[in-house]
Image: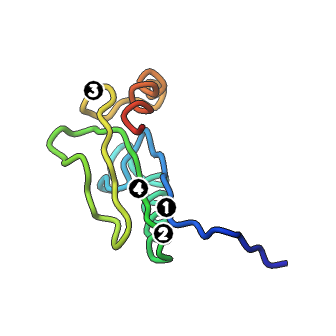
Amino acid sequence: MELSFALPVQRVALLSVHTCPLALLGGKKTGGMNVYVRDYARTLACMGVQVDVFTRSQDDCQPMVKHELGRGGRVIHIPAGPEQPIPVAEVQTYLQEFSEGVL
């Protein structure tokens, strides 16, 4: 059975609160989620979908918007909490601030 939609998806927002898809792999807290979000966003962008990945800013030296996911894909760093990696268990502390930054 083939699915069809009346309106094609043209824009997608992905939220990756605790990890950035552009983080260097091999670090203590980088790996599967980073790769999955990055590759999923790139795949959608290759299909012509505009993709914005919102992630919590962890480095104040990084620009707020980076266009490193290929054509049509970008990562947007949202200030929420300290400008450094935090334990996953602490992410919920900053979800309200993160949500307000996305909106």
Between circles 1 and 4, the one closer to the viewer is 1
Residue at mark 3 to residue at mark 1: CA–CA distance: 29 Å
Point out residue 17 in the picture as x, y percentages from the top left corner.
Answer: 44, 39
Q: Label 4 belongs to which residue?
A: 52
Residue 11: give its label: 1
Residue at 44% over, 21% down = 93
Compare marks 3 and 1 and give the one earlier in the sequence.
Answer: 1
Q: Tell me the CA gap for discs 4 and 3.
A: 22 Å
Q: Earlier in the sequence, mark 1 or mark 4?
A: 1
Query: What residue type is disc 3 on?
Result: Pro
Residue marked by disc 3: 82
In the displayed orientation, state which residue is furthest to the top.
Answer: 93
Q: Residue 87: image x %, image y %?
A: 41, 29
Contact (Cβ within 8 Å) of mark 2 with mark 1:
yes
Residue 49 is marked as: 2
Q: Earlier in the sequence, mark 4 or mark 3?
A: 4
